[in-house]
Image (tube, grey):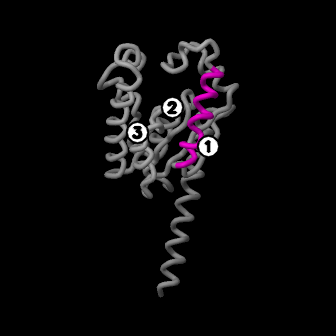
Amino acid sequence: MPAAGARIALIGPPAAGKSTIGRLLAERLDIPLRDTDARIVAEHGDIQQIFASRGEARFREIEREVVRKSLRELLDRPGVVSLGGGAILNPGTRAQLKHPAIKVITIMIDAEVARVRLGGSRRPLLDDDEDPVAAWQALVDERQPLYESVSTATVSASNEPPSTVVNRVVDVLTKLQREEEYARFDQEETID
């Protein structure tokens, strides 16, 4: 299957659906998923509690270590890594994501979808705000240049079921794979 040997990192804002899309994408391509938020919870406890008891700075240290390991594992073996929304803030993470073997897909949603998804969810940087959607939009605006600096492609997850988003991601990955194969073929033809 095209893209089955891919090394894929999913980035994007909170509530974009990276964990769900990552799980479905990994199942579709029959490759492992490494969800960094899930790993943090499994190894260190609830993210909300980490923020509350140890602060954002300590959470970011924990997150960086989990992301570093997950992306290093991705280079050893094809798979999908789903990163938390703020992981992109770390320069080391951005440097790792620029590795040519990793296809970085930004999953984006619009503010209306965020409004629905944020209702009742527990997101440390959005919980205390009177208007979580405005806080979410401020995060997106702040991080957008960082997403763009490492992104191979952007896929919208607004107003579509996760399976459709997964199809879009596979289409993008297949197109990229074909372009790389054509480029290699052209290069081989030039050398001959």
Residue at mark 2: 20
Image point (68%, 27%), residue name: 111
Q: Residue furthest bottom?
A: 192
Q: Which numbered disc, 1 or 2, marks the residue that appears first in the sequence?
A: 2
- Give the label, 3 or 1, closer to the camera: 1
| Dot 2 crowding, Cα within 10 Å, few <14, some 14–19, many 20+ | some
Q: Give the structural element (helix, strand or loop) at label 2.
A: helix
Q: Give the structural element (helix, strand or loop) at label 1.
A: strand
| Dot 1 crowding, Cα within 10 Å, few <14, some 14–19, many 20+ | some
Q: Residue furthest left?
A: 43
Secondary structure mostly seen in magenta is helix
List x then y, in percent, for residue 120.
57, 13
Amino acid type of the residue tagged 3 in the rendering: Leu
Image point (38%, 42%), residue name: 32
Q: CA distance from mark 1 to mark 2?
A: 14 Å
Amino acid type of the residue tagged 2 in the rendering: Thr
Residue at mark 1: 155
Amino acid type of the residue tagged 1 in the rendering: Val
Image point (50%, 48%), residue name: 104
Q: CA distance from mark 3 to mark 2?
A: 11 Å
Q: Give the structural element (helix, strand or loop) at label 3.
A: strand
**Range covered by the magenta-colored residues:** 133-149
- Give the label, 1 or 2, closer to the camera: 1
List x then y, in percent, for residue 150.
51, 49
Which of the 4 quarters of the picture holds residue 154? top right
Q: Which numbered disc, 3 or 1, marks the residue that appears first in the sequence?
A: 3
Residue at mark 3: 33
